[in-house]
């Protein structure tokens, strides 16, 4: 039982850190399903830890019901507050030294108005679903470090011909 608490604390620390990094830094989870996964495990592990501290949630049935309730709450939160994912439309530049660094034009649907929001952003791919993003001025950047790609992508982020 002691190892269960230790692993539960570890799950909470890791998932809550990722969710907080995603919210308050330039770290970005690029897939809403991955974001939901981390949010669900951070919230449910926190509730179970608090339940154990107050000597509640002692049975497997109560823990399973807690997971279902927290999952439902996370789904409702995501449904109400989700504004869409930023999707890369065009890869403008790729870094010459590091192929994981790109400068992209991204768009996402504007939830309460007809149309789209767009941005030009520098992206460093950490993993397939994790990115470090930062604003960049394409006029003032050092063009000797970047190769112009101008690669158009479709809805599934596959290259399309011009």
Image (spheres, grey):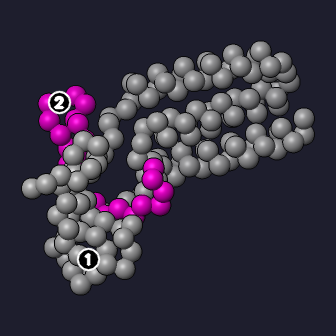
Q: Is residue 141 above or below residue 88?
A: below
Can residue 105 be seen from the camera position used here?
Answer: no
Left or right: where 112 falls relative to 31: left
Q: How far across and down, in percent of the image, does residue 37 sit? A: 55, 36
Left or right: where 162 falls relative to 73: left
Quadrant position of residue 115: top left
Please name the predominant secondary structure of the magenta segment in the image: strand
CA–CA distance in space, label 1 to label 2: 35 Å
Q: Secondary structure at mark 1?
A: strand
Q: Is residue 102 above or below residue 82?
A: below
| Membership of 115 in magenta stretch | yes
Q: How far across and down, in percent of the image, does residue 68 sit? A: 62, 19
Which disc, if any, is residue 1? none
Quadrant position of residue 78: top left
Q: Which residue is mark 2?
A: 113
Residue drawn at x 60%, y 50% is 17
> Which stretch did the figure color magenta?
105-129
Quadrant position of residue 44: top right
Q: Is residue 74 above or below residue 159?
A: above
Residue drawn at x 31%, y 74% is 95
Q: Which residue is mark 1?
A: 146
Q: Is residue 48 above or below residue 86?
A: above
């Amino acid at each position: 039982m002691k190892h269960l608490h230790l692993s539960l604390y570890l799950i909470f620390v890791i998932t809550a850190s990722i969710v907080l990094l995603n919210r308050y830094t330039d770290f970005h989870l690029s897939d809403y399903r991955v974001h939901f996964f981390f949010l669900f495990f951070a919230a449910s592990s926190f509730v179970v830890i608090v339940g154990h501290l107050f000597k509640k949630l002692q049975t497997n049935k109560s823990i399973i019901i807690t997971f279902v309730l927290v999952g439902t709450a996370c789904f409702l939160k995501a449904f109400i507050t989700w504004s869409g994912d930023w999707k890369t439309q065009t890869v403008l530049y790729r870094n010459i030294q590091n192929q994981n660094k790109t400068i992209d034009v991204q768009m996402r649907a504007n939830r309460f108005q007809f149309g789209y929001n767009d941005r030009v952003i520098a992206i460093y791919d950490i993993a397939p679903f994790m990115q470090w993003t930062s604003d960049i001025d394409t006029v003032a950047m050092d063009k000797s470090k970047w190769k112009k790609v101008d690669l158009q992508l479709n809805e599934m982020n596959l290259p399309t011909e011009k």
